Amino acid sequence: MGQQCFVLSDPKLPDNPIVFASPGFYKLTGYTSREVLGRNCRFLQGPGTDAKAVDVIRKAVGTGSDATVCLLNYKADGTPFWNQFFIAALRDSDNCIVNYVSFAFFGV
């Protein structure tokens, strides 16, 4: 079984930064925790990333809905990779969004 590749972000903080990344995320992207934590996941984007797909993610975060898109992202060494990206809001017992979870499925 492959490694789980996901991050948690905190919408209560400015720019919804990543507050946790799975070991699989670090392994597959080549980034370290120092390079990832506290940043918005936009740092994975680059010149080939489709702006329309990014807009789908932005709208989902703005409305608290789920979204799945295929993105061209970039590893720490600049290598591009296709990422089937899924994002969902995690809610507390009062239905307030406390985090977003984003799963990455590489090589699609």
Image: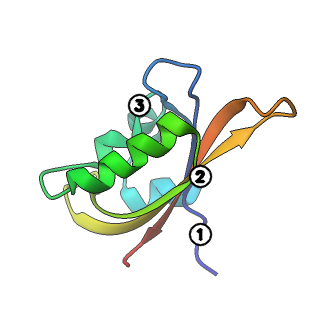
Depth check, front residue: 79 or 73: 73
Disc 3 or 1, which lies upstream in sequence? 1
Whether 35 is drawn above or below 85: the answer is: above
How packed mark 3 is, by other alpha carbons closer than 10 Å (few <14, some 14-19, many 20 or more), is some
Which element type, helix, strand or loop, lies under badge 2?
loop
Horizontally, residue 62 falls left or right of residue 70, namely right
Horizontally, residue 51 falls left or right of residue 105, namely left
Q: Give the residue type at disc 3.
A: Arg
User: Residue 13: which disc?
Assistant: none
Q: Which residue is mark 2?
A: 22
Residue 79 percent across, percent down from the top left: 21, 63
In this view, the mark in front (3 or 2): 3
Taking the spot 48% from the left edge, 30% from the top edge, the residue there is 17
User: Residue 39: which disc?
Assistant: 3
Taking the spot 28% from the left edge, 67% from the top edge, the residue there is 81
Q: Which residue is mark 1?
A: 3
